[in-house]
Amino acid sequence: MDASDADKTLAELGAKPSPSEEHGLSLIRDEDKMIFSPGISTAGFAEIRMVRQHPDRKVVATTIDREGLARAEEIITSLGLQGQIETRLEDLRGAWNYPREYFDFIYARLVLHYLSVQDLEVALKNFTRSLKSGGRIFVVVRSVKNVTASDPHVRFDPDTKLTTYPHYDASGALLSTNVRYFHTPESIRTHIEGAGLKVDSIEEYQEQLYRDFMRRDMSPHTDHVIELVATKF
Ligand SMILES: C[S@@+](CC[C@H](N)C(=O)[O-])C[C@H]1O[C@@H](n2cnc3c(N)ncnc32)[C@H](O)[C@@H]1O
């Protein structure tokens, strides 16, 4: 798929691109036919673009968000792509259901930071087992730079490495609390190498946030993310 095709797909779906998504999709090679996408993208946009690159490509996309999955399935079916995109309500912390040497590419964008250190290590070992030799993984996780350590509501659990932090509305009122494993380049590199993968590249940058899932309404905030590509040898 060249850039203009990608733009056409996004325009058709009504969504804006984001740099890490574009980078992850650009890494997928013609020969990557079996792709695993844990934490399906909003409305399945990234997975739709993956299979539109190749009629014989298959993507297995999972999530624990029942509503989000239903919305993605509706769009995928309306485009007639349900034969190429297999969607599953499946938790990365649960049983691992995939054979050895099964996937050519794993697209793990903005999903692994939901896992505690213990769950992350198990998930990454499962990924390694099910990647083919020469297969690659694309990872984007949120950075510790997003955490305001001085906020009295922020709590770090050293056992799980999970941070519980508040989410405020525009007026400063507490909306909700979220839980994530915020990474440094060293932490995500160590976990990936510990799972037996070789890190090819790692970089850290800021990405624009949007208020809505279609990425039409730009938020005043950016997100610090760490992007990593690794290969199984
Ligand atoms: C930020 S969203 C979308 C990430 C998506 N890969 C993208 O690039 O847009 C995170 C996704 O991860 C899913 N998720 C969170 N924890 C998960 C878990 N333990 N197992 C599987 N999916 C999970 C959420 O339900 C959601 O679908």
Image (spheres, grey):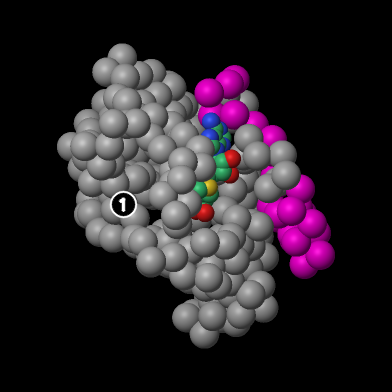
Q: Where is residue 124? Give x, y as percent.
A: 40, 30
Task: Point out the stretch of residues depicted in magenta.
Answer: 70-95
Classify mark 1: helix, strand or loop.
strand
Q: Is residue 83 magenta?
A: yes
Please name the residue that numbered disc 1 is placed on: 225
Residue farthest along the top direction in this orientation: 159
Residue farthest along the left direction in this orientation: 186
Q: Foreground residue, 203 or 102?
A: 203
The vertical placement of 224 against 186, above or below, is below
Residue 160 falls in image quadrant:
top left
Q: Quadrant of ligand 1?
A: top right
> Where's the C terminus, which quadrant?
top left
Q: Where is residue 62? Give x, y as percent.
A: 62, 40
The vertical placement of 217 against 183, above or below, is below
Residue 211 appears in the rendering: yes
Q: Foreground residue, 102 or 96?
A: 96
Mark 1 residue CB less than 8 A from any atom of ligand 1: no
Query: Mark 1 Cα within 10 Å, few/some/many (few <14, many 20+)?
Result: many
